[in-house]
Image (tube, helix red, strand yellow):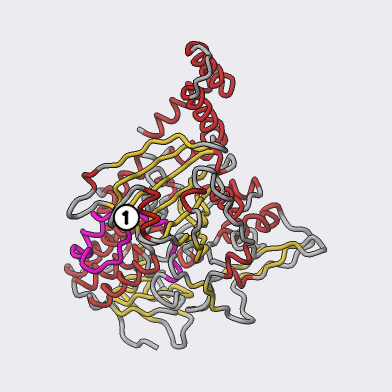
Amino acid sequence: MIKEEFDAIVIGAGMSGNAAAYTMASDGLKVLQLERGEYPGSKNVQGAIMYANMLEKIVPDFRDDAPLERHLVEQRLWVMDETSHTGIHYRSDDFNEVKPNRYTIIRAQFDKWFSRRVRGAGATVLCETTVTELVRDAKGKVIGVRTDRAGGAIYADVVVLAEGVCGLLGTRGGLRKMLKPEAVALAVKEMHFLPEEVIEQRFGVKGSEGCVIEAVGTISHGMAGLGFLYTNKESISLGIGCLVSDFAAKMESPYGLLDALKNHPSIRPLIAGSEVKEYAAHLIPEGGYKAIPQLFGDGWVVVGDAAQLNNAVHREGSNLAMTSGRIAAEAIIQLKRRNDPMTKRNLALYKTMLDKSFVVKDLRKYKDMPALLHTNACNFFTTYPRLMSQAAQNFMRVDGTPKIEKEKATTAAFIKARSRLGLVSDAIRLALAWR
Amino acid sequence: MTNPVRILRVEDKLYQNRYLVDSGRPHINVRPHEQPSANLLALTRVCPAKCYELNDKGQVEITADGCMECGTCRILCETSGEIEWNYPRGGFGVLFKFG
């Protein structure tokens, strides 16, 4: 099929793959990018919030033509029980800036745009092509790939695995281990379409301003999970995700959770009358720092979700993906300039550079959080949300009960649910994991 | 109080999605078994596209046409060999319009 040899083959056209392909092609490297979908984005699913700063570092003028939905001026963090939500809202006019910080995007559209930029930079992008195997030389160095298209292997100096969370090639090729059910979440999402002005009214936004809600609580039925609602221009992305291990242990259905969330009295009015146009599901790496696999080897590097680079606490993924793709590309460019071979030893430069970036620094900060949330899912996602809700209601409801008695009742409820020791130990463990 | 949101069956949810089904070449297969393991049985509830169902002998069967290629079943059942999982051929499978 393709006789020529490339400087680099990038597998996958998601955030990390596009970032890597764009960066290398812009520098003049001969890049082939392979994507199994009909078009870039057709297999990709995200909430989605895109962080401008990380994209600016790759495509400085992205605002000129990228399909952006709304720039975020308001973030609501909710703790929910069956009938209520208690929330922290942050809204600031400071987010109405010339170059806004965060945007909602629709991945299929965004990825098509990014891919046009990748082609524009000079890379060859081949869609509808599933890579089936990595090709190695006698010493085990990765020297190319085989695909499901007719023809033989395609060769390159280095292969960038941007194959996404499932990471079939890497796991089957022995580059990294299979994901564990407790280190990955399954999220389901629906696209609810509503007229632009209805969204503006319901969320108190105007123009391209946007609002997002992220919620924990009884909505995840005692599992470690998160619900989200993101406003796009003419649609709302509504979804919920929980750890795969929890889903399996509890035999819960993800669509059942999503349907319950849609009917929650705090969510229902926000999506009333909407037309659902798509239902999607995707995995999210949740293992954090301790789950990061080997990132480089002879003739290969791995980036993005395939490398488990996802910050579950801050719900950041695509920016880590983009940044890891860019940094891997920059490392490869440096080696290329020096005419250094793409050996494991030389490609260690990618990890050295990544370790110095926010990507690894942030993940290291929260290295103990996944284990804490996994083992305490019931307390953090059910017991405390119920207690918070009761406390808030007790505080708000005026019924003639003396305030001192109300406060005592609230304190007693917390102690009854978790015991004094339990409360202190939960607080300490959370603080330690956060630090 | 707004009216309850209409709940669609999973089959109807999937009907809104676009697929290009590779007829006769399912990308996931379940290994023949007498009784499903706990993880394999869980797929009948956990698969977001409800691809896995119990037959009247209590065995788990798959119809992969509505698969969204999330990989949940692979995480739960590939290591034990109970399912065989691959991506569809290039261009086939789910085609997200929004994603």
* Residue at x 60% of width, y 63% of height: B49
**Residue B65 appearing in the image:** yes
Q: Is residue A260 above or below residue A30?
A: above
Determine which quarter of the picture holds residue A413: top right
Whether A51 is among the magenta residues is yes
- Relative to B13, is A355 above or below? above
Specify the segment rendered in magenta: A42-70
Quadrant of the rendered image containing residue A122: bottom left
Q: Nearer the viewer, residue A4 or A56?
A: A56
Q: Residues within 10 Å of mark 1 (few under 14, many from 20)?
A: many
Where is residue A138 drawn, in percent x and y? 41, 74
Q: Element type at marker 1?
A: helix
In front of the other: B82 or A275: A275
Residue that appears at 58% across and 24% down: A417
User: In the rendered picture of this protein, how many numbered marks are placed on residues?
Assistant: 1
Amino acid beneath label 1: Asn
Give residue B79's quadrant in the image. Answer: bottom right
Image quadrant where one finds the C terminus of chain B? bottom left
Residue A148: x percent and y percent?
48, 81
Q: Looking at the picture, does residue A431 appear above or below residue A250?
A: above
Q: Nearer the viewer, residue A10 or A50?
A: A50
User: Which residue has dot 1 on it?
Assistant: A319
Question: Residue at 53% of width from left, 66% of height from top?
Answer: B69
Q: Is residue A243 visible?
A: no
